[in-house]
Amino acid sequence: MSAKIKHFPGEEVETKDIREGKIPTEKFRPKAKFAWSAGVAISKFLDELKNGKIIATTCKKCGRIMVPPRIYCEKCYKPTDGWAYVKDTGVINTFSVSFLAADASRLKEPIIVAIINLEGASEGMGIVHRIEEVKDWKKVKIGMKVKAVWKPPKERTGAITDIKYFKTMEEI
Amino acid sequence: MFGKKRVAIVGAGVTLFRRNIKETGKELSYEAVKMALNTAGMELKDMQSVVMGSAPDAFDGVHMKGEYLADGAGAHCKPYTRVFVGGGTGVFTPLAGWWHVASGQFDTCLVVCEEKMSSCYPHPQFAFTTIFDPILERPVGMNLIWIFALEMNRYMHKHNLKKEDIALVSVKNKRNALDNPIAQLAAEITVEDVLKSEIMAWPVQRLDVSPTSDGAAALILASEDVAKEVTDNPVWIDGVGWCIDSTQWTNRDLYYPDYVEYAARMAYKMAGIRNPPKEIDVAEPYDPFDYKELHHIEGLLLCKKGEAPKLTREGVTQRDGDLPTCPSGGLLGCGNPIAAAGLMKVSEIFWQLRGEAGKRQVPCDPRTGVAQAWGDLMQYGSVIVLRR
């Protein structure tokens, strides 16, 4: 973009001409699948979700109660010292009202997603989850109190989605 | 500074930025490199090493992207490295080039950044979903725009900002891009246009966001001896900084990018900069979203926390203001071929300091400039300070 340069290379083409093969193209769709071990700390966390409980780990050196739990404290760089339950209530740290699905397609009914600072964990220790049972999304505010809505015990699989969503304590 | 060699930028090249470009990533890299070599008056045989920067492999669907791009990047039978730190790549790549030359191992280094976001469809957004934690985050159905919306909302909340305060950045950068021949989304728009644009993930609206793009950029780095041989007006890399924060992004307060501040402090210390707002004449903070420019002006210590919207409102960040930011038009105006977009910012500072930016030239006769990029899970800062 020097003023001394007059020509900038690159030939613009239309997206549809590529997708529809109107210009020479090749297509491929990967069929790879993945199965992840949840690891030491998160396996226990998921097992506890199945029981309807949220578990954290603690570090005596920095005093933090950390959720999601971990087997090492990344700040003190030492093993964590133990486990502690935190509450399934918390406060909205921040939120978004999304009209976009994961593939960027448009949604008619928005998804509300939030970072929720859980009660009983250290300041600022949040998890990301959805907020539902909201009639008017414009009334969602940072700082609102929320509570987990769990799947019935029989339907829980040991996944973050054992918490179906969080709902605001006051009706909005 | 003991033991380190001084490193200069002596040439730069950049292709058009567009939603879809016919050229492959290799071809785009070749074009950017040829332009950079031409402007430096050098040839490929003069390049002793090559560093390539490119963002996630999933965009191209080629899981050895560094190797795939090597020939186009001019790396045939040369010492070659590909680096990747998400969105921070475009400014990190010249930092990696810097240590090649500063170490004394090489007298020259060719720095190349390329991105083809158009290959992945229906939308590269889907490739982005694989950056999230597979156990705790992906099952919630994460979308990349969400996390920026979460960050933007937190920033607005903490400083009690209105969308109007933030939209001004989009208006400025898209207008600046009207003077940039490579720009994809240059436009004269109003704050009202931004506020009326489609809501993507509140508070993020269509005109708050940069587009997906194809493009490439390249720089030629040289040691002091070589630089003085090939040019009368080298631009010096006087400060470098980079830093990563925790990947546990839900455990951090997203209202402020600490990691950008740490990277900036590292770069300023090396450059001997004590008072950044006074000593920096022109800045290219990373602006994939309008609020990010504000966030990064603050992280770069160019003003106090929460004051960047005020600077913007008062015109301080316009080209003719006291602290011009994104005179190139930024990512909001030029487009966002991720790694190439970051390197374009470094190129812009290079041209601004050389007084070659034409219609985009800031009138303050700049001597010192800073460029910065940001990436991974809202956790990576890369900062470069340039001086003429």
Image (cartoon, rainbow, N blue to C red):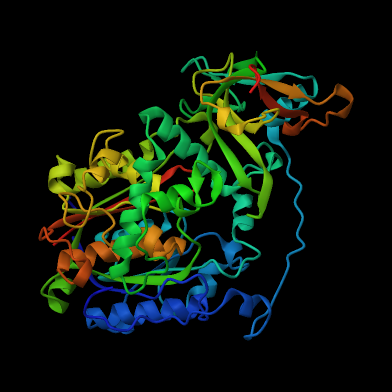
Q: Position of residue B11 (x, y in %)?
A: 25, 74
- The percent position of residue B177, horizontal first and vertical second, equals 32, 65
Q: Is residue B348 left or right of residue A65?
A: left
Q: Residue B75: in sight, yes or no?
A: no
Report which quarter residue B340 is drawn in: bottom left
Near-viewer residue (B373 or A113): A113
**Residue pictured at 47% horizontal, 16% vertical:** A61
Report whether A102 appears left or right of B385.
Answer: right
- Residue that extends furthest to the right in the rendered view of this protein: A154
**Above or below, B61 relative to A101:** below
Question: Taking B10 as reference, is A109 left or right?
Answer: right
Q: Which sits in the foreground, B276 or A35? A: B276
Q: Position of residue B92 (x, y in %)?
A: 37, 56
* Residue at the (37%, 49%) spot, across then down: B191
Q: Quadrant of the C terminus of chain B?
A: bottom left
Query: In this figure, what is the number of numbered marks?
Result: 0
**Residue at horizontal 45 percent and vertical 30 percent from the top:** B253
Residue B311, visible in the rendered structure: yes
Q: From this view, report whether residue A169 is shown above or below residue B29.
A: above
Residue A9 in percent (x, y) is at: 39, 82
Residue placed most toward the observer, A81 or B332 = B332
Q: Is residue A4 left or right of residue B197?
A: left
